[in-house]
Image (cartoon, rainbow, N blue to C red):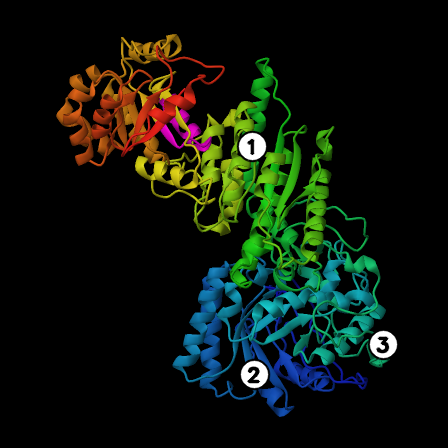
């Protein structure tokens, strides 16, 4: 339980000896040195009272645990415990005030000087739920425990040290697990709204994933218990009967599992009610003994009886109803003493024992299934997602409120101007493939990463639904080998239903994720993430898995569809490497592509960058893409093309495979120079083997009316050969890998300078030239200079070219020869020339491939 430092009052309790005792001893008991609130000068128990208390506790345990070294004098506990042969687990309190920790260290050194830190002290925890309460961060908790270890080492003290917090905190911050020598956790099924006779099974279910995360580290239960009186809005039923039921079942479970634990608590603490700042009154009633030292009747009459089978690991096998096994996320208020308040949404899953979202002071629970491999790891990682959702909602409340208000005002302004805001549809795809999330064997970082993604996504979805009453949401899972709908498209008819709808989304998503995790992966199948299927359904997704080259065409078809329908595709990349697919999708559709460096801030990125709709983004300063990886996928090998192939390599590969090369043409500057870059990249995505780029010219006598008009568009814009080279260079920086051939007339080359064109073209990423009006007799100089710079000079032959002239053309050609299949000018064709076969037979050259122009 959370130890109290807030102001409160309570009377001094005079404890009497109790003759009643449990019929079995418990492993350990939590003991509070407080008897009054902060403002009471007599808030701490006297040495005599402590001795009397411990004498009572010695009848039911051999181990006690405390919370602080400086709040009250712990020396009385250490002295009395030694006299009664009790071991002591000490607590070091930490809070947002660093002076509290300094006081704890000072008190510890004083205890060392007094010779009280000896073998009777069996462990020390630094902090108790401090991260859960948000008093400190996980990083600060780790810093404190490392600092305290140093204090001990400097004084030759060897005692196990841990951080104590709730299970969900360790799931969210796995680095905290390894910071201590052992792991100590607090877990109260009471706060998960389960029935008392099912609580032990729920405890077992909740702790098993953490035990797996801890690996070889010992896990000790530092706090668990059940109140015997009082009330709590978000808790279960508090009564002596239920308290005895839980103690009986937990004792049997712990015995079967051989767990070490410290039951909460030894005595009732009435002072907590006097300083509580909410309606929760159960905090004072967790004691096995009341404040006078009398054992409560339900406990004094308790005869421990085994009621469930706890002999196996994993999910509990006790005979509980199906409703407990179907818990997907439950809430429970914390100790109510951290001084933090918040608001949130609460909903149900059709099971009265399970709710799906909570206030910030709520603890959480999630059912997991015993499975194998990556699916089991995924199931374990789903624990506590909704609890993290509620915590994030609190910690980001101010930022979200400001953003939501700005969005709403923008919509109101649009409506006022007669431009009514349209309803929003957000289609969200989540990569849930456990084969990729747990590719490294299910490390703690992997588990925390998936949990962070799900919880951040749910808060993001909640925020989106609150932006406008008409907003709708669809969530799809790109899973192993399939695309699964996590949530259908809900219609929201009034503003008041938004909070309830958000809760339904949370519950539905978690339930479907749990179902997906229940299904083991088939090792005989590739289990690739169904990106193409999901993108076809949604045109948007968040990807962690690597790009799958087989999906390239399907994904690009989806991107083109999105582009036509003016659907912006946003991408938030959580993988180690960038996704070229998603870079291209976001760039072409006007969406946002971003790869955050710090995944712990995922929610902030989602809210700040992706939440505003495309119409609002022009008002905001959002991340832009400095560069886009437009590398294509090789159709033969289904791999990303990292190095641009040369013309010769393309032709050689096509000849070796007896397949045709697809050579395309586009004049530079049509309709604008910027459009040309996108067209080049689009041609590459469409499968172009080689791309010819036309140099705008005022008198393209060899071209028909269509290309002449396209040339004139470029001429009217003043596009020169220098601009053409710059366009190719820009396209290369954006991922163009297909060979590029400049096609034009010699006047352009002569004006630019034949001595400069080859080195400049090489530097820009050009692969060759087709000069329509340059006779082969005059081409040797340009051909030789091109070859010197690794470029191809590509001459032309036609049906009227003689055999001798073909040999001359072949002597200056590099890469291939451009075979014009028809005499006359260029233009569209509805059919191939009738004499094509004969022409191809006669145009075979000794050393050059012939590429047909039809």
What residue is drawn where x is 33% and y is 12%? 711
Q: Is residue 683 left or right of residue 548?
A: left
**In this picture, is 35 found above or below 425?**
below
Figure disc tally: 3
Prevalent SS, magenta region: helix
- Tag 3 secondary structure: helix
Question: How far apart are the two marked residues, 1 and 3, measured between alpha carbons?
Answer: 69 Å
> Who's the residue at 49% across and 28% down the image?
589
Precedes in sequence: disc 1 or disc 3: 3
Q: Give the percent coordinates (x, y) of residue 63.
A: 65, 83
Q: Nearer the viewer, mark 1 or mark 3?
A: 1
Q: Using the numbered discs, state the Cα–Cα distance from disc 3 to disc 2 in whole angstroms.
A: 32 Å
Q: Which residue is mark 3?
A: 297
Q: Is residue 94 visible?
A: no
Q: Quadrant of the N terminus?
A: bottom right
The disc placed on residue 122 is: 2
Does the stretch in magenta take in 688? yes
Can you give x and y, in whole percent of width and height, for residue 696 in the image? 29, 15
Q: Select label 3 or label 2 by which is in front.
A: 2
Q: Residue at x 26, y 23 (%)?
A: 803
| Mark toward the start of the polypeptide (3 vs 2) | 2
Which quadrant holds residue 280?
bottom right
**Neighbour tally class for label 1: few under 14, some 14-19, many 20 plus, Cα within 10 Å:** many
Span of residues in magenta: 674-691
Answer few, some or many: residues within 10 Å of disc 2's Cα (few below 14, many 20 plus, some between 14 and 19): some
Label 3: how many Cα within 10 Å (few below 14, some 14–19, many 20+): some
């Amino acid at each position: 339980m959370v130890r109290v430092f807030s102001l409160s009052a309570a009377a001094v309790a005079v404890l009497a000896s109790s003759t009643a005792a449990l019929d079995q001893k418990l492993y350990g008991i939590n003991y509070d040195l407080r008897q009054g609130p902060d403002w009471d000068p007599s808030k701490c128990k006297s040495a005599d009272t402590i001795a009397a208390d411990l004498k009572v506790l010695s009848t039911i345990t051999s181990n006690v645990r405390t919370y602080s070294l400086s709040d009250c004098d712990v020396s009385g506990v250490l002295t009395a415990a030694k006299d009664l042969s009790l071991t002591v687990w000490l607590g070091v309190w930490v809070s947002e005030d660093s002076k509290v920790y300094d006081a704890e260290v000072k008190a510890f050194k004083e205890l060392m000087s007094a010779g009280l830190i000896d073998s009777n002290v069996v462990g020390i925890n630094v902090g108790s739920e401090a991260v859960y309460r948000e008093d400190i961060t996980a990083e600060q908790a780790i810093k404190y425990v490392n600092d305290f270890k140093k204090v001990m080492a400097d004084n030759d003290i060897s005692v196990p040290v841990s951080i104590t917090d709730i299970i969900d905190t360790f799931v969210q911050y796995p680095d905290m697990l390894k910071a201590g020598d052992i792991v100590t956790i607090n877990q109260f099924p009471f706060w998960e709204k389960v029935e008392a006779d099912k609580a032990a099974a729920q405890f077992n279910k909740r702790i098993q994933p953490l035990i797996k995360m801890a690996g070889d580290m010992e896990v000790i239960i530092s706090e668990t218990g059940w109140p015997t009186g009082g009330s709590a809005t978000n808790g279960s039923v508090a009564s002596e009967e239920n308290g005895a039921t839980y103690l009986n079942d937990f004792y049997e479970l712990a015995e079967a599992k051989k767990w070490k634990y410290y039951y909460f608590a030894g005595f009732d603490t009435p002072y907590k009610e006097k300083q509580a700042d909410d309606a929760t009154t159960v905090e004072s009633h967790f004691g096995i003994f009341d404040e006078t030292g009398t054992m409560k009747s339900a406990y004094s009459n308790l005869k421990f009886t085994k009621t469930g089978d706890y002999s196996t690991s994993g999910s509990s096998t006790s005979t509980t109803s199906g409703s407990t096994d179907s818990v997907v996320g439950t809430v429970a208020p914390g100790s109510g003493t951290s001084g933090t308040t918040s608001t949130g949404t609460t909903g149900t899953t059709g099971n009265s024992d399970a709710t799906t979202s909570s206030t910030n002071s709520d603890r959480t629970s999630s059912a997991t299934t015993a499975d194998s491999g990556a699916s089991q790891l995924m199931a374990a990682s789903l624990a506590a997602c909704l609890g993290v959702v509620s915590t994030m909602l609190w910690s980001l409340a101010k930022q979200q409120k400001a953003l939501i208000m700005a969005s709403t005002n923008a919509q109101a302004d649009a409506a006022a101007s007669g431009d009514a805001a349209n309803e929003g549809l957000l289609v969200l795809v989540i990569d849930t493939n456990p084969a990729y999330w747990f590719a490294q064997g299910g490390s703690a970082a992997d588990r925390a990463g998936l949990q962070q993604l799900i919880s951040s996504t749910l808060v993001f979805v909640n925020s989106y639904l609150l932006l406008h009453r008409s907003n709708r949401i669809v969530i799809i899972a790109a899973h192993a080998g399939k695309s699964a709908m996590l949530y259908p498209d809900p219609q929201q008819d009034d503003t008041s239903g938004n909070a309830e709808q958000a809760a339904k989304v949370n519950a539905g998503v978690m339930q479907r994720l749990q179902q997906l995790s229940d299904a083991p992966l088939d090792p005989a199948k590739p289990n690739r993430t169904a990106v193409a299927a999901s993108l076809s359904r949604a045109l948007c997704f968040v990807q962690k898995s690597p790009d799958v080259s087989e999906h390239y065409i399907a994904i690009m078809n989806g991107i083109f569809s999105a582009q036509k329908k003016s659907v912006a595709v946003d991408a938030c990349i959580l993988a180690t490497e960038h996704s070229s697919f998603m870079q291209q999708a976001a760039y072409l559709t006007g969406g946002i592509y971003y790869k955050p460096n710090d995944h712990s801030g995922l929610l902030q990125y989602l809210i700040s960058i992706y939440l505003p709709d495309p119409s609002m983004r022009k008002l905001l300063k959002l991340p832009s893409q400095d560069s886009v990886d437009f590398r294509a996928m090789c159709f033969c090998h289904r791999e990303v093309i990292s190095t641009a192939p040369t013309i010769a390599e393309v032709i050689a590969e096509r000849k070796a495979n007896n397949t045709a090369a697809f050579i395309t043409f586009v004049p530079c500057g049509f309709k604008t120079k910027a459009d040309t870059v996108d067209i080049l990249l689009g041609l590459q995505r469409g499968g172009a083997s080689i791309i010819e780029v036309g140099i705008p010219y005022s008198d393209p006598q060899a071209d028909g009316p269509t290309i002449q008009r396209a040339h004139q568009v470029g001429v009217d814009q003043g596009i020169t050969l220098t601009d053409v080279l710059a366009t190719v260079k820009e396209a290369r920086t954006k991922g163009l890998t297909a060979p590029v051939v400049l096609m034009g007339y010699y006047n352009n080359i002569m004006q630019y300078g034949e001595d400069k064109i080859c080195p400049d073209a090489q530097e820009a990423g050009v692969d060759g030239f087709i000069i329509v009006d340059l006779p082969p007799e005059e081409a040797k100089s340009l051909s030789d200079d091109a070859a010197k710079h690794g470029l191809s000079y590509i001459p032309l032959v036609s049906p009227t070219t003689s055999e001798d002239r073909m040999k001359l053309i072949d002597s200056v050609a590099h890469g291939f020869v451009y075979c014009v299949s028809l005499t006359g000018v260029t233009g569209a064709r509805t059919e191939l020339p009738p004499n094509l076969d004969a022409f191809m037979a006669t145009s075979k050259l000794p050393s050059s491939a012939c590429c047909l122009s039809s």
